[in-house]
Image (tube, rainbow, N blue to C red):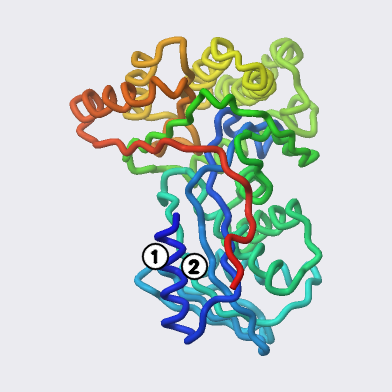
Amino acid sequence: MTSIISRAQHLFEQHFSAPAAFVVQAPGRVNLIGEHTDYNDGFVLPCAINFKTVVCATKRDDGLVNVVACDYNQAPDAFSLDAPIKASHQQWANYIRGVVKHLKQRGYQFRGADIVVTGDIPQGTGLSSSASLEVAIAQTFKVLYQLDISQTDIALNGQEAENQFVGCNCGIMDQLISAQALANHASLIDCRSLEVTPVPLPTTWSVLIVNSNKKRGLVDSEYNTRRMQCEKAAKTLGVLALRDLDIATFEVNQHKLDSVTAKRAKHVVTENQRTLDAAIAMANGDMLTLQALMSQSHASMRDDFEITVPEIDTLVDIIKQAIGELGGVRMTGGGFGGCVVAVMPKELVAGTIKAIEKDYYTLTGLVAETFVCTAENGAGILTVN
C-alpha cells in the first residue's frame, strides 16, 4: 500500500508542482455470501479488503477538475463544473465524471480539484474496483470541501452514478461496504433498509481470494437477464421483491413460475436465508455451519442460478479437498469467471495455496492468483499534508 501511495504522491507533484493536500482511500470488497441478492432487496455479507483505490488531491479556486490516472499510462482527463458534465471516450474517466455530476445534482456546492488516482485492486475480477473508485472520488470531495454528506449517501451517489451515467444497473452492496466497512469485521447489509450490522471475523480465520484468471464472459447480458427473471418472479408471486418470500412460501407457490424462472427465484430466496444464517455462524465462530452454508451457496449458483463455469467449479473443488469441513469456499461476484472466496483457519492457508498451485493449472491450463486478505476499514483520509 505504501508504494502506491508514494507513486501517487510523486506523480501528483510531477503534474501539479506541489504536494497533494490530502490522500484518500476507498477499499475493494469480497462478498463472503449473498450473491445476486442485493438487487432483490435482500441480504449480503461482504467485507472490505486490503486492496484499495488511492486518490491524491488538492482543491482549486476555479471550476476545473483535472484528473491523472496512474494505472492508465498517466492518462489525463479534465472537465468543468461550470458546464454540463458529459461522458468521456475514456471509460475510467466516466466513473469520476458520473460521481461529480451526481454530487452536484444532489445540491452539494464545491469547486474544482487537481486529482491523481491509482489503486491495487485487480480489475475485472469482481472485487469492486469501480465501486471503490466511485466512493474514493466522493470521499475526496467530501474531504476537500467539508461536504455534509453521510457515508451511506456517498455509497448511494456512487450507485446512482454507475446506474445512470456509466450505464451499469448494479446494486448498492459494493459502494456501501467500501464507504463504511469496519476493520476486522464483515458487514451484514440489508439492501432494502441499508442497515449495516458489523459481524466480527474471528481473529484465527483468514479470507483467501483466488482469481481463477478465467476471463469473465457474458457478465453484462446475463446479469441483466437474471435481474429481469427475478423481477418477473416477484411480480408473478405478488411481492415487491424476492426478499419478501420465505422458503416455505416460495415452495408452495413456485408452480406459478416457469421452470427456469423458478430456479432463479429459488436461488435468491434460499441465498437470503443462508446469508442471515452465515452472519450468526460467523459471529459465533461456528465454522462447521459456515462451511455448509458456503457450500450450499456455491451449489445454488451452479445449479439454480447457473452462473458458474467449469474452471470456477474446479477451483472450488480443489480448495474444498484441501480444507474439508474446516473452511468454507464458494464462487464470489457476478459469475462466469472471476474469483473464488474461501474462509479458513490461518494455519490452512499455505497448504491450500500449494494445492491450488499443484492442481489448478493441470486441470484447466490456467494459473490462479491468490490473495490473503484482511478485513479493513471503509473510505477515509490516509494522510494530510
Question: In this orientation, which residue lies closer to the viewer: 14 or 356?
Answer: 14
* Mark closest to the chain's N terminus, 2 or 1: 1
The residue located at (49%, 85%) in the rendering is 16
Question: In this orientation, which residue lies closer to the viewer: 377 or 164?
Answer: 377
The residue located at (47%, 17%) in the rendering is 327
Whole-angstrom CA distance, mark 2 to mark 1, is 8 Å
Residue 164 is situated, as x and y percent measured from the top left of the image, at 65, 60
Amino acid on which the number 1 mark rests in the picture: Asp
Amino acid on which the number 2 mark rests in the picture: Val
Proximity of marks 2 and 1: CB atoms separated by less than 8 Å: yes
Quarter assignment of residue 271:
top right
Q: Confirm whether residue 223 shows in the render.
A: yes
Q: Is residue 55 above or below residue 358?
A: below
Q: Which residue is mark 1?
A: 71
Residue 331 is situated, as x and y percent measured from the top left of the image, at 46, 29
Q: In the rendered picture of this protein, how many numbered marks are placed on residues?
A: 2
The residue located at (72%, 38%) in the rendering is 191
**Image quadrant in which the N terminus is located:** bottom left
Q: Secondary structure at mark 1?
A: helix
Q: Is residue 59 above or below residue 51?
A: below
Mark 2, Cα crowd under 10 Å, few <14 / some 14-19 / many 20+, is many
Q: Which residue is mark 2?
A: 117
Q: Secondary structure at mark 2?
A: strand
Indicate left or right for 296 with 229 as reference.
left
The residue located at (54%, 66%) in the rendering is 55
Q: Is residue 378 above or below residue 334?
A: below
Quarter assignment of residue 48:
top right
Residue 121 is situated, as x and y percent measured from the top left of the image, at 44, 51
Indicate left or right for 230 with 18 as reference.
right
Q: Confirm whether residue 302 shows in the render.
A: no
**Image quadrant in which the C terminus is located:** bottom right
